[in-house]
Image (cartoon, helix red, strand yellow):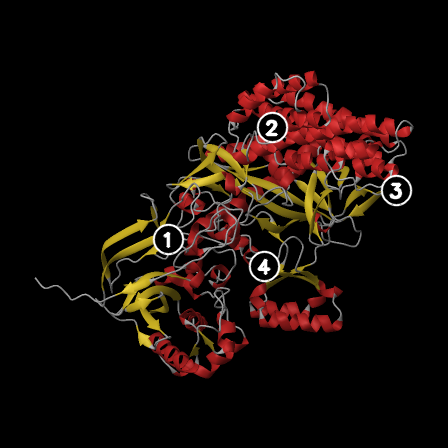
Amino acid sequence: MGIITVDKSDHLFWLGRYTERVYTTLKYYFQSADKMIDANPEYYGEFCRKIGIPNAYGTREKFLRAYPFDETDPNSIISSLNRAYDNAIVMRDYIGTETMAYIQLAIDDIHNAKNGSAALADLMLTLDHILAFWGCVNDMIDDEQIRNIIKLGKGLERLDLYLSLDLPDNDVRREYRRMKQFLAKSKLRYDESVINTVDNMMTDDPLNHPNLKKLLRNLINE
Amino acid sequence: MFLPQDTSRQTISGLSIHISDKEDYCVSEDNFGNKKLYGLIEGTHDRFNVTISGEAQTGLDIFEEYTANPSAYAFLKAQTPLTAAGDCIRKYHRNLELEKIAGDYDKALCMMNTLHYTFTYDTEATEVHETAENALALGRGVCQDYAHIMLSLLRMEGIPARYVVGMTLGEGASHAWVEALCNGYWYGFDPTDNKLVNADYIRVSCGRDSSDCAVIRGNFYGCVTQRQTEKVTVSEKEQEHD
Amino acid sequence: MKELIKNAETINRLLARYGVKFGIYKDGTFKEQLFPFDPIPRIISNGEFQYLEKGLKQRVNALNCFLSDIYGEKRIVRDGVIPEEFIYSAKGFLPPCDGVTPPKNIYSHISGIDLVQSKDDNWYILEDNLRVPSGASYPMIARELQRRSAPDAFSSNSVIDNRNYADMLKEVMDYVNTGGINVILSPGRYNAAFFEHSYLAEKTGAVLSTGKEIVCENDRLYYIDYLGRKQRVGAVYRRISDEYLDPMTFYEDSVIGIPHIFEAYKKGNVALLNAPGNGVADDKGIYYFVPKMIKYYLGEDAILKNAPTYLPYYEDDMRYVLDKFDNLVIKDVAEAGGYGVVFGSSLSKEKKEAFIQLLKSEPRRFIAQEVIDFYDLDILGTDGTQVPRKADLRAFVLTDGETKVWPSGLTRFSRNPDSFIVNSSQGGGFKDTWVLSR
């Protein structure tokens, strides 16, 4: 294909970001739901604080229902998945009908889970299809430029979420190294001073998660 | 943006064109014979200026153009959404009793004359995209409305007619009038001033109606409010004798 | 056939998986809907296809001659075959196109000709679509998926593969390309046919683009990548209508077009498929004159017949229309997509009177046609039985150096047993169309 316009690079980047957001928040949702069964029924407040969304849920039951399934809530998982779809559907000729189908399947899964009786277990299919989507990106998209932009979006989103969720420093450092590879390969324009500062901060022990997060949000100005 | 050009009645010389900071632009001719100047500015900018100046020698003849093949202009007999006749124009047309007048040229004169005295010049009454029918119903409007109504009447008579944008002597804005094809000759009629187009007029462009020959047309990407001003200055120059 | 019916559920699941949808605006919001698919194909024998092929080629060739004439010498008007008011007052006649010759002098590259078959087995042309006919992608992907879900149905029948549409389309784009890449220009994802735009881009290797990704500089078109590199564009298969194509020539407020693309086209620096201005030839009023065009330009009699049509513009026809009003279907020439169609018999007394008044005051605006007794096609009903429904066929005719007919087509059917309207926007579904190789 060879030619990716500014609009298209934007779609690819956000396709990466939103699929990652669905994947990692869904996994964290599973862990949190487990905690809320008996250990800490109020844990959803903590969940909202960490992930940086307003806690407008009120009860555990409402949270467990609304966070994955409420399409009117822009922070819900289904909303992120819809945004991923929005960015995928305009890129059919770049990523291919086969690859796109996995986003569609993930959406169908989440709707089925919403209407089914075992929501948590059914939601695992969404994870399966996001993984299949990424597999397809690796396997079926010839153009490495396209792959790199998607993966840059994915990497940056993951880093942002890991920092928000206070995951172990070593995981953060690993994801940062990965992200930097795709940043270079994607040839997207970015703020080099951010990378210089973050490079230095990555040697800190422990890492300053809030500052890193703030800095990295300015890496790519659109 | 349209550039004035040579016709039977006028010749244009010494055109100078300045477009903001831009050196290059394209020129093309459309099927009305208008010469169009256009281009693209990449990158952000907060203003856009075009200044065009030159000399026109006018009044060389009494018609704009002669055409041996009037059927080439058959499409100018068709009304456009802006000139389409409604009840109001149809009634006005009936009252003109044009069937009593023999030639197309004299019919056009009658339209111009009647319209001038029955329609009131008013810069507040009509909108930019007003239809001829609405303007006539209001009974008032600007040169564009006079021209659209007259076009509608001419076309009802099966006379090919076109809208003309140009300038007249003095300072102000651009002006509009009509041209009608009578016996192979295109004549200019100015119903606003009830005048046959003469040496005081410089012709810039023509089309089916005002939407074909807006003085300037363009668009941009961005979320800002736009302000547009237009200034036309025409002054007389002594004929040089050598 | 049994196998296809048995696997109806499977194929519907696959169609959903691949997002075979069309967009629709309901109450002001955009929704995507699956295009209902019926597993029982329309089958056209090889002999019948050869007949259709001959007739369709003839028709499209004449229509291309007509467009070239109208925007050129206008002989057909001068010779009195078509009255000039049917040309110059038609919304589709675009004066800016007058005198402009498109690359290789082809106006309608992709023509969608709608036909119906009557109970007595005759085919009739319903309408010509020479602007942006859509629908080829649906049978393409349906075939792909049906071969997967019911392979035996294909190994036991000799069905011509229709998945070559993308190659045919690419050949057309390459043929008129003036140097540069092929682009499919879409208004964007909120367009009813966006699935098709993106699917055809994927399958032809053309770049799917929106207007703002392309610029016109010095009368040439360029596609600009995110690193600022420019690539020349040589052919634009535009899926946006003429009015929106170029805000500098046509509708000024268009935000989906490309400013000055018309200048590049006029100077021969880019091919537009289909050419702007084609609306003058697929106007419902002009339809009446197509058999006369075939005679005039090709010196042949039309192979495929029009549905019997009357022009209230002519006094004789008006008298007939008023006389036989209840037996006729009246169509507003300015409308499309199944809108503006009135069956004389369906009107109440008051409505009928009001309509006749309108007809008398604007005769040029309407055509009247005999209601054709459709040959119904079976579809699979919700209870698993087969029920007959009205259906039409959109044949796709492609023109490059020669004119070719795609050996398939879009068969649309009405899901409502009492309706004649098959348009997807009005709830119709589609079938695959099989052309047999024997």
- A122 or A39: nearer the viewer: A39
The local secondary structure at tag 1 comes to loop
Mark 2 vs mark 4: tell me if same chain. Answer: no
Subunit of label 3: C
Subunit of label 2: A
The residue that label 3 is drawn on is C383
Residue A141: which quarter of the image?
A: top right
Coordinates of residue C78 in the picture (x, y in percent): 41, 60
- Which tag is nearer the camera, tag 2 or tag 4? 2
Subunit of label 4: C
Specify the quadrant that holds the N terminus of chain B: bottom left
- Which tag is nearer the camera, tag 1 or tag 3? 1
Kindly indicate whether the residue at mark 1 contacts the one at mark 4 (C-beta within 8 angstroms): no
- The residue that appears at 30% across and 67% down in the rendered structure is B171
Q: Callout 3, which amino acid? A: Asp
The local secondary structure at tag 3 comes to loop
Q: On the picture, is C3 further left or further right than B205?
A: right
